[in-house]
Image: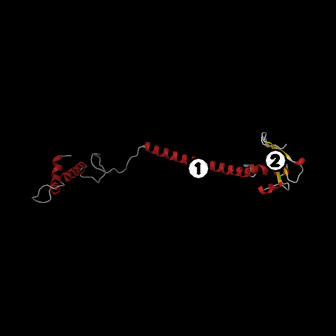
């Protein structure tokens, strides 16, 4: 840009930003105002006073570009990220479907399996109750007279035959001694 022309065009406005009136000293803001004024002068005058115009044949003048050019690599990056996003989304959907299907199948198997499980005795009294049940029921799970509660054990006799081997006898109180079952502690088998 030509300095003589630029200064002659911009000099009259310079006095108004440096002083606060005629015959006064420099403004407290004169330094920042001068910087801003010179910056504006350089941009506008350097653009041949066409700040808001698109560039002409001479690409040095003018500040507005009609369009922004996006590099082809940016398009590829955006497409790649979109592909990764869709792939990840589909992966999670499939994973959730597999997990939920597996959970439903496992729950159904568990419910059917729990129906076949019988309670395991966990105390001396519950083992005695179980032994009395097996004595009456044998292989028949629906036999009559089998004790079902701890209170039903009042009519039964439990005798320890051999404490070192853990052998005990069980039988009804009104039965004869020949009809008494012997149970070993080690194996839990009736003898």
Relative to the observer, which residue lies in front, 129 or 72? Answer: 129
Comparing labels 2 and 1, the label whose residue is closer to the camera: 2
Q: Position of residue 13 (x, y in %)?
A: 17, 56
Residue 71 seen in the figure:
yes
Q: Taking 164 as reference, is 105 above or below it?
A: below
Which residue lies under the disc numbered 2?
A: 159
Which residue lies under the disc numbered 1?
A: 93
Q: Position of residue 9 (x, y in %)?
A: 17, 53
**Outermost residue toward the top in this view:** 164
**Which label's residue is closer to the chain start, 2 or 1?**
1
Q: In this view, does 30 lie to the left or right of 50?
A: left
Disc marking residue 150: none
Q: Where is residue 66 in the image (x, y as percent from the top left)?
A: 35, 51
Relative to the observer, which residue lies in front, 40 or 104? Answer: 104
* Residue at 60% in and 47% down: 95
For mark 1, give the secondary structure.
Answer: helix
3D distance between C-alphas at marks 2 and 1: 64 Å
Residue 73, quarter of picture: top left
* Residue at 77% in and 49% down: 127
């Amino acid at each position: 840009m030509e300095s003589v022309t630029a200064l002659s065009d911009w000099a009259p406005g310079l006095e108004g930003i440096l002083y606060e009136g005629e015959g006064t000293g420099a403004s407290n803001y004169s330094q920042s105002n001068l910087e801003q004024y010179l910056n504006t002068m350089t941009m506008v005058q350097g653009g041949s006073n066409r700040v808001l115009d698109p560039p002409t044949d001479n690409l040095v003048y003018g500040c507005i570009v009609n369009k922004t050019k996006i590099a082809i690599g940016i398009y590829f990056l955006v497409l790649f990220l979109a592909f990764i996003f869709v792939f990840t989304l589909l992966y999670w959907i499939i994973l959730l479907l597999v997990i939920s299907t597996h959970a439903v199948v496992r729950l159904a198997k568990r419910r059917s399996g729990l129906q076949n499980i019988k309670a395991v005795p966990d105390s001396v009294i519950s083992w005695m109750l179980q032994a009395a049940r097996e004595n009456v029921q044998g292989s028949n799970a629906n036999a009559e007279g089998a004790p079902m509660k701890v209170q039903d054990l009042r009519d039964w006799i439990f005798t320890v035959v051999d404490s070192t081997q853990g052998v005990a006898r069980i039988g009804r109180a009104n039965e004869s001694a020949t009809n008494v079952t012997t149970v070993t502690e080690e194996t839990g088998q009736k003898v």
